[in-house]
Image (spheres, rainbow, N blue to C red):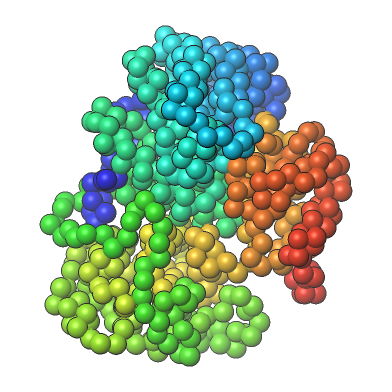
């Protein structure tokens, strides 16, 4: 199955064009940036104001939640208010569970987002073995509920996003395909087939997950399946990492998921989901898409070879274990962090105080073989050696090969004997001085994170950031976000929206202050139950809005405490973690730092 033109040469996937109001998605149009307002949809004035602020910041499409028919009806007032103020930004209604709300919303907006996992489907996590006949009957029931919306959108020229979330697959899909990328793809394709049967084609797909590996695999599998279905299945793709959280970690996780797919030519519109005010999402999304909007297809130089990994299923590249500077790397060892000698000398006096962000190996002392991945003679010499070698791509080699950083390391991994460990770099042109740190962060996370999610890499070196302490923090945070090395508490936090039942930003800050010292514990913070239980599949504990002012606490997917007053919920979450043997008392300095 092919998911891109070439994993070694950039070429954007050419799709049909889907029009959303005055904005076109796909084809040769720029990759569009969108976001979502966070206020109550029934607050017309606030909804208009937040939308205007997003549009002013450069947001090209704005999404508004419509959880009930009443909310959906109020979209008429919101859209009218925006148009009266001269704002033509297209509005998308976000629908979960209620077809009636979708039918109302489609009367007023330019696009409707439906989630196949819960549109006309309840979610009970039942274990049911469906016969083929039972499964077909369920599909017919979905067709009956979905058809009126398709017909209405077709008649009014309203676009649609068929948006699957890893955290909200239906029980029917879960029991046949599992909680998997395949299940996500099949769920979306079922709805797409209904739309196509009705000769409706104004839709885009999305495959969101809070886990970048799952997200990447799901989107690749989706595009591969679309390619197999035929050339007229060339629908645009919406990219996003859901529940990414806030701060630097969220930006890194978003770059790994979104940036790696953009680098493969996949993606026509993006949303960066941050647990922050929505306007903060826009510059991150703009910075992610800018290099690709300005990038033309690379001519195929004929340099092709079989990939060293399965792009649809993660497995770390097998390598032999070696020792450098007294540190083991490769094999089953942790992915190690390197630093240049010059950087090491700047921080040598304070390494004892650097905690988890210490340099592990100095590059100049690691006997690293730097080669051009197109130099078959050099690779042949390395492969002929009996002992495993530490290998990386030489700096500036892309000037000679025309390969991007990601493509160069993929090519190296494909040609190099797997026993040789590989050192990943974020850039092949080390900076002389620091510039825009957001750009540095997004570039490093896209390049290194993408390769780690491909299973490539035994060590990493961030050399696009001059400040060694900052480069080391970035290195470790990329490893954490890619799931390659867990060294601190991991948080899955959804962005706020009109469904949210508590203040996500302040609540996330309070939970972090109480739990930031719990290394390796994963905590999900969800504003409502739409995606909460499902997106917490990987989490150890969950904090979910159950009702206004009330919180439900979860262990994995299982709710264990209900309707807790918000003022007591963080303390009870700590008790729950303690009951399950994962609580440790914070060191005094960490407790102070968290405050």
Is residue 139 something one can see in this rendering?
Answer: no
Q: Is residue 497 above or below residue 570?
A: above
- Image quadrant in which you'd find residue 159: top left
The percent coordinates of residue 531 (x first, y second) are 61, 38
Is residue 194 something one can see in this rendering?
Answer: yes
Q: Residue at x 37, y 14 (%)?
A: 198
Q: Residue at x 75, y 54 (%)?
A: 511
The percent coordinates of residue 392 (x first, y second) are 31, 75
Q: Residue at x 49, y 24 (%)?
A: 134
Q: Is residue 292 left or right of residue 439?
A: left
Q: Is residue 561 above or below residue 372?
A: above
Q: Residue at x 36, y 71 (%)?
A: 318
Where, quadrant-wise, is the C terminus in this rendering?
bottom right
The percent coordinates of residue 117 (x first, y second) are 53, 32
Looking at this view, is 204 or 1 the one in front? 1
Looking at this view, is 547 or 13 the one in front? 547
Looking at this view, is 46 or 556 the one in front? 556
Q: Is residue 79 left or right of residue 557?
A: left
Q: What is the total number of numbered labels drawn onto the structure image? A: 0
Q: Is residue 458 left or right of residue 116?
A: left
Where, quadrant-wise, is the N terminus in this rendering?
top left
Looking at this view, is 231 or 89 the one in front? 231
The residue lying furthest to the top in this view is 155
The percent coordinates of residue 144 (x first, y second) are 49, 14
């Amino acid at each position: 199955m092919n998911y891109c033109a070439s994993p070694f040469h950039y070429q954007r996937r050419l799709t049909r064009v889907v029009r959303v109001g005055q904005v076109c998605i796909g084809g040769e149009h720029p990759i569009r940036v969108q976001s979502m307002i966070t206020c109550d949809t029934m607050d017309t004035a606030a909804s208009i104001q937040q939308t205007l602020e997003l549009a002013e910041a450069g947001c090209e499409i704005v999404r508004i939640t419509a959880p009930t028919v009443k909310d959906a009806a109020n979209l008429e007032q919101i859209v009218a208010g925006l148009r009266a103020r001269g704002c033509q930004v297209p509005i998308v209604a976000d629908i979960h569970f209620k077809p009636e709300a979708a039918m109302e919303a489609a009367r007023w907006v330019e696009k409707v987002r439906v989630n196949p996992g819960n549109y006309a489907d309840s979610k009970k996590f039942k274990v049911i073995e469906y016969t083929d006949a039972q499964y077909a009957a369920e599909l017919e029931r979905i067709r009956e509920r979905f058809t009126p919306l398709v017909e209405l959108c077709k008649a009014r020229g309203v676009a649609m996003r068929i948006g699957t979330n890893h955290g909200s697959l239906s029980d029917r899909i879960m029991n046949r395909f599992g909680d998997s990328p395949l299940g996500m793809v099949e769920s979306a394709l079922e709805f797409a087939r209904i739309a196509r049967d009705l000769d409706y084609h104004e839709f885009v797909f999305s495959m969101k997950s809070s886990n970048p590996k799952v997200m990447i695999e799901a989107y690749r599998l989706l595009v591969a399946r679309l390619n197999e279905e035929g050339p007229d299945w060339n629908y645009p793709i919406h990219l996003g990492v859901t529940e990414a959280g806030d701060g630097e970690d969220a930006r890194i996780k978003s770059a790994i998921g979104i940036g790696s797919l953009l680098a493969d030519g996949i993606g026509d519109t993006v949303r960066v989901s941050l647990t922050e005010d929505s306007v903060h999402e826009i510059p991150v999304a703009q910075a992610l898409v800018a290099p690709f909007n300005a990038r033309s297809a690379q001519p195929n130089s004929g340099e092709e070879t079989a990939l060293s990994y399965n792009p649809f299923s993660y497995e770390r590249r097998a390598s032999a274990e070696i020792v450098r500077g007294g540190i083991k790397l490769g094999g089953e060892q942790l992915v190690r962090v390197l630093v240049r000698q010059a950087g090491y000398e700047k921080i040598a006096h304070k390494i004892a105080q650097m905690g988890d962000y210490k340099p592990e190996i100095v590059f100049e002392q690691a006997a690293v073989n730097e080669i051009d991945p197109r130099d078959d003679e050099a690779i042949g010499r390395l492969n002929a050696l009996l002992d495993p070698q530490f290998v990386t791509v030489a700096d500036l080699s892309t000037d000679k090969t025309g390969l991007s950083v990601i493509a160069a390391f993929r090519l190296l991994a494909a040609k190099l004997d797997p026993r040789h460990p590989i050192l990943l770099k974020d850039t092949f042109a080390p900076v002389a001085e620091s510039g825009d740190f957001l750009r540095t962060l997004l570039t490093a996370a896209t390049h290194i994170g993408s390769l780690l999610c491909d299973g490539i890499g035994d060590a990493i070196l961030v050399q696009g950031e001059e400040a060694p302490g900052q480069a080391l923090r970035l290195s470790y945070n990329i490893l954490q976000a890619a799931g390659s090395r867990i060294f601190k508490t991991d948080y899955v936090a959804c962005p706020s929206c009109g469904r949210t039942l508590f203040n996500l930003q302040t609540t996330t800050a309070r939970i972090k202050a109480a739990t930031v010292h719990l290394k390796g514990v994963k905590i999900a913070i969800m504003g409502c139950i739409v995606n909460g239980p499902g997106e917490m599949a990987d989490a150890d504990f969950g904090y979910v809005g159950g009702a206004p002012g009330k919180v439900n606490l979860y262990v994995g997917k299982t709710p264990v405490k209900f309707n807790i007053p918000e003022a007591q919920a963080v303390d009870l979450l700590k008790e729950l973690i303690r009951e399950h043997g994962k609580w440790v008392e914070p060191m005094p300095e960490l407790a102070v730092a968290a405050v």
